[in-house]
Image: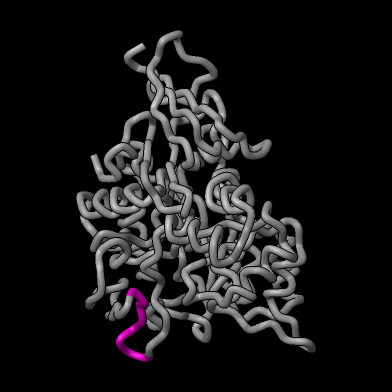
């Protein structure tokens, strides 16, 4: 009985819908179907129980960078996001030279093998110079399949996603290579036309890296990549729901056309997430964070975000007025499926990891459990 926990009385969000006055039973590090008679229950009446959040595009937090930090710093960044409900996180790299990226991939793949990370994402260097955002233009290169293969190999099976401007030389062949190796080919930081984007989807691309951002705007004569990505059922679109990257109408448009099953909320967080305003480095570029908005010191481009997924959840459920079930799909289930880990995380079902987030009636985070252990205790509302 000592290993069992019963969380009772809450609105429980399951894949089949919301269960009122529901219970979630935890046995050790897993969700269970039943508990021994007499197991005490934690009364969470008036709260929401949702699966732990899954962030498939995240560059750091807590003052730590996944691209350049030490192992201890990377773990600090991971823990920072766990305190905000993200129990599964992919480490994303910004553009660097190939030697540096292969070295980082080797280092962080060990953390992925240990279960601290859910894998690695290379956002660059295979992106368009004219849509570079907060990436160093001098380090960009065309997506030569041989270079893409070097990064995959360096990650030792832990590469989950590579963002590409697929219109560049080698782009389509690189998409095919990634698909053959079970790595997500994501279209992003791209200047592609509608037709070029459709070609990349047919070649095997399955994700749009932060839809709308770092790509041509939707046009009525030249619809560009946005229309192609929204209309194709094979594509999941990432959205940064922080109120800075997207107008609420743009988010609504994405949900209307793609549906809740094809949206993944991400943070695209950089070091300042969960840390505060100030000056930071994003790869080799200096960033100033002011009023929680990150911009390059040179040029003023938005440089990732300071978002945490608990804020994205609350914004989606309150300001955007999305159904809670749709938010859970976008913030947990959909990214878990894309990453190939839905058998373990992404929903509150028996046999899965006991990764659980407790929210109050106003969708404020009150508790976080990862693998059966409280990281944020809901009875105290504070980190353990």
Rendering quarter of residue 101: bottom left
Percent position of residue 227, x then y = 73, 74
In this rendering, would 215 be left or right of 273? right
Percent position of residue 110, x then y = 32, 42
The magenta stretch spans residue 323: no
In this rendering, would 284 be left or right of 153? left
Q: Say which quadrant the C terminus sits in.
A: top left
Percent position of residue 310, x then y = 43, 55
In this rendering, would 48 be left or right of 287? right
State whether residue 290 appears in this view: yes
In this figure, which colouring scheme has been used for the structure?
Answer: one colour
Residue at the (30%, 86%) spot, across then down: 297
Residue nearest the observer in this picture, 128 or 319? 319
Residue at the (39%, 64%) spot, across then down: 269
In this view, 119 is above or below 64: above
Furthest toward the front, the residue is: 46
Magenta residues?
A: 292-299
Residue at the (39%, 54%) spot, across then down: 91
Q: Say which quadrant the N terminus sits in.
A: top left
Residue nearest the observer in this picture, 127 or 295? 295
In this view, 321 is above or below 214: above
In this view, 210 is above or below 233: below
Percent position of residue 122, x then y = 45, 61
Furthest toward the right, the residue is: 221
Furthest toward the bottom, the residue is: 299
Residue at the (44%, 50%) spot, across then down: 153
Rendering quarter of residue 346: top right
The magenta stretch spans residue 298: yes
């Amino acid at each position: 009985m000592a290993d069992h926990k019963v969380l009772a009385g809450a609105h429980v969000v399951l894949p089949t819908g919301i269960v009122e006055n529901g219970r979630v039973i935890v046995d050790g590090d897993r969700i269970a179907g039943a508990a021994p008679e007499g197991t005490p229950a934690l009364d969470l009446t008036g709260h929401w129980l949702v699966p732990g959040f899954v962030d498939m595009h995240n560059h750091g937090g807590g003052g730590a960078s996944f691209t350049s930090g030490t192992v201890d710093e990377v773990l600090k960044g991971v823990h920072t996001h766990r305190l905000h409900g993200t129990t599964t996180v992919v480490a994303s790299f910004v553009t660097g030279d190939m030697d540096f990226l292969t070295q980082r991939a080797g280092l962080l793949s060990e953390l992925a093998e240990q279960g601290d990370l859910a894998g690695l994402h290379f956002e660059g260097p295979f992106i368009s110079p004219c849509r570079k955002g907060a990436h160093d233009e001098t380090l960009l290169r065309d997506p030569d399949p041989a270079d893409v293969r070097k990064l995959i190999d360096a990650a030792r099976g832990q590469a989950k996603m590579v963002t590409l401007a697929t219109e560049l030389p080698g782009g389509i062949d690189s998409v095919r290579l990634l698909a053959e190796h079970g790595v997500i080919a994501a279209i992003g930081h791209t200047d592609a036309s509608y037709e070029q984007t459709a070609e990349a989807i047919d070649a095997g691309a399955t994700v749009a890296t932060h839809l709308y951002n770092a790509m041509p705007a939707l046009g009525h004569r030249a619809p560009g990549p946005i229309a192609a990505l929204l209309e194709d059922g094979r594509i999941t679109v990432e959205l940064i729901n922080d109120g800075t990257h997207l107008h609420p109408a743009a988010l609504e448009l994405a949900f209307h056309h793609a549906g809740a099953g094809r949206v993944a909320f991400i943070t695209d967080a950089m070091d300042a997430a969960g840390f505060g305003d100030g000056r930071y480095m994003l790869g080799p570029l200096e960033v100033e964070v002011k009023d929680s908005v990150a911009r390059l010191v040179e040029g003023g481009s938005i440089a990732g975000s300071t978002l945490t997924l608990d804020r994205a959840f609350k914004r989606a459920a309150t300001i955007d007025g999305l159904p809670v079930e749709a938010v859970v799909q976008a913030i947990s289930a959909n990214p878990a499926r894309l990453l190939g880990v839905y058998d373990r995380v992404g929903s509150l079902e028996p046999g899965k990891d006991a990764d659980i987030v407790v929210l109050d009636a106003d969708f404020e985070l009150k508790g976080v459990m990862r693998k059966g252990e409280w990281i944020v205790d809901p009875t105290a509302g504070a980190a353990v």
